[in-house]
Amino acid sequence: MGTPAPLAPDDVPARRLDTRIRRMDGSLVLAFGETVVQLSESGALLYEHMDGRRTVGMLAAVLAETYELSEQEALTDTGEFLGYLLENSLAEVRTSGP
């Protein structure tokens, strides 16, 4: 699979409706096709806030506030996490631009 295009702070990520979600041993586990991913605590926080209305910037702000990160660190971490989900067909994104 190719690398997804970088996300802009105004892009809106959303969960894929066909992704299976389970909570196992306190962790959030996502499955789509043959792909199964156990999310870290911060990944679960971001995923739980991905409602199809919040932008990448808004998600990064949640991460920054929760883990006391700088805005840039949070944007970088959020972008990497969302890129991974997109690359593995576990999320979709609505872009802000034309």
Image: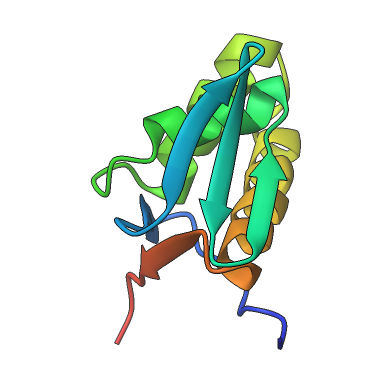
- Vertical placement of 15 versus 63: above or below? below
- Vertical placement of 96 versus 27: above or below? below
* Number of numbered discs: 0
What quarter of the picture does the N terminus occupy?
Answer: bottom right
List the single residue furthest toward the left: 53
Q: Measuring from the top left, give residue 58's x and y in whole percent.
A: 41, 36
Q: Place residue 39 in its image quadrant.
A: top right
Using the image as rendered, state which of residue 95 and residue 71 is in the foreground: 95
Using the image as rendered, state which of residue 18 and residue 86 is in the foreground: 18
Q: Measuring from the top left, give residue 36's x and y in whole percent.
A: 66, 51
Q: Measuring from the top left, give residue 62's x and y in whole percent.
A: 50, 23
Q: Place residue 95 in its image quadrant.
A: bottom left
- Vertical placement of 52 versus 85: above or below? above
Q: Measuring from the top left, give residue 60's x and y in whole percent.
A: 55, 35
Q: How is the image coloured?
A: rainbow
In percent of the image, x 45 and y 38: which residue is there?
21
What quarter of the picture does the C terminus occupy?
Answer: bottom left
- Vertical placement of 63 versus 60: above or below? above
In percent of the image, x 55 and y 44: which residue is there?
30
Left or right of residue 91: residue 37: right
